[in-house]
Image (cartoon, grey):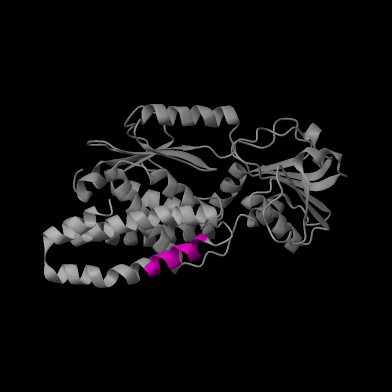
Amino acid sequence: MGTIAENVSNLRVCAWHTASLRAAEVASIDGRAGATHAGGVIVSSCQRTEAYQLGEGVAATGPEGSDVQPCGCGADVVFSGRDAVVHLAAVAAGLESVVLGEAQILGQVRGAFADAPAAVRQLGEVAIAAARQLRRETQFRSHAGHLLDRSLAITGTAARGRLLVLGAGAMGRLIAERGVELGFDEVVVAGRTRPNTTKESGWTFVPLAEAGRLAPFDVVAGCLGSGAGEVSFASLPAIGSLAIDLGTPRNFGTGVPCRLVTVAELLADEAQQQHRVRRRRELTSRLAEIVDARLARSAEDGASPVGALRSAVERVRQRELERAQRLHPEVAPETLDALTRALVNQIFHAPSKRLKESRDERLSGELAALFR
């Protein structure tokens, strides 16, 4: 494992855009990413598939560049070095998501890097920590439910009549709750299993298999997971005005009987909103400053046993934090992160300070080794 500066220099990320592609296309991209980046870290979300890997002497292109193809994988965009770390932090912070500041992507990135090779995992930890810091500094007011607002605005569709939401996961519930807030007369969520919630917040639940027997709806929103497969409109009630496909792979196949909005269209519309583009750039610039500071701190920590102890303890905390979030999905990820961080800091602040003051590198190294 090289120094953190060497690892940063050799990091690359190859990324493919997957928003609103069909299942076969997404599977092809995922297969290519895995085959051409064996041993790398693959991060998949509803908008992209990305492969992170260390490679000697890698040059790369940014989103607007076109001069180098480093590994023949056919990626849509490639970053290297410090830009790759900043990009990873931006993905983890939700700055690259269709919903600015999306919270769920942070857990996906953390899970993908949990079993990465040590050198890559170290850079992942820096990026994730930087993303968390930006989220603490920034009040993100949007959530996935607001994709309903944007879809209605793009198409000039009024929030009235009946709304059908396919999928009872986190996104489906947020869309349903937003539909109630916007004033739809009736909101129905159709899912394979009833969500584990204490109340349904103004919407009703039906099993997905029974949705086709319902009365017609004005708007339908597809929020089904990646393994759901495409839904045929023949199996759904009649849809009068609008279909919103928020799935990747796509939830809806061919033969759409009304206006269709996809994630890809929402992204394209976002790119035309200059105030939104400017906001993302400002946040990414601030995030880059945080990344630089954390990389400098990690380089300093890596040279000391006390720094190694802090890194080892943080890895334990991250592992347990991920487990706690799986066991308690009802608690906001930011709340669990803040609680566990505060607890660990309280426990290890005094021992770390005394070890640093003692300058006993042998003892510090042995203590750090206990947490590996």
185, 194: nearer the viewer: 194
Residue ID at (23%, 36%): 56
The structure residue drawn at horizontal position 17% and vertical position 56%, both measured from the top left corner, is: 365
Left or right: 237 as drawn, with respect to 327: right
Give, as a single range, the part of the protein colored magenta: 333-343
Q: Look at 65% across and 36% down and name the residue there.
A: 228
Q: In the figure, residue 41 lies in which quadrant? A: top left
Residue 4: image location, x then y, percent: 22, 50
| Residue 96 visible in the current orientation | no
Q: Main secondary structure of the magenta part?
A: helix
> Vertically, is 73 above or below 297?
above
- Horizontal and vertical percent position of residue 226: 59, 38
Query: Can residue 245 be seen at all in this image of the molecule?
Result: yes
Q: Is residue 338 magenta?
A: yes
Instruction: Tell me where residue 287 sits by quadrant.
Output: bottom left
In the image, residue 339 above or below residue 220: below
Q: Quadrant of residue 37?
A: top left
Q: Is residue 363 magenta?
A: no
Position of the N terminus by quadrant: top left
Report x, y in % for residue 255.
Answer: 75, 31
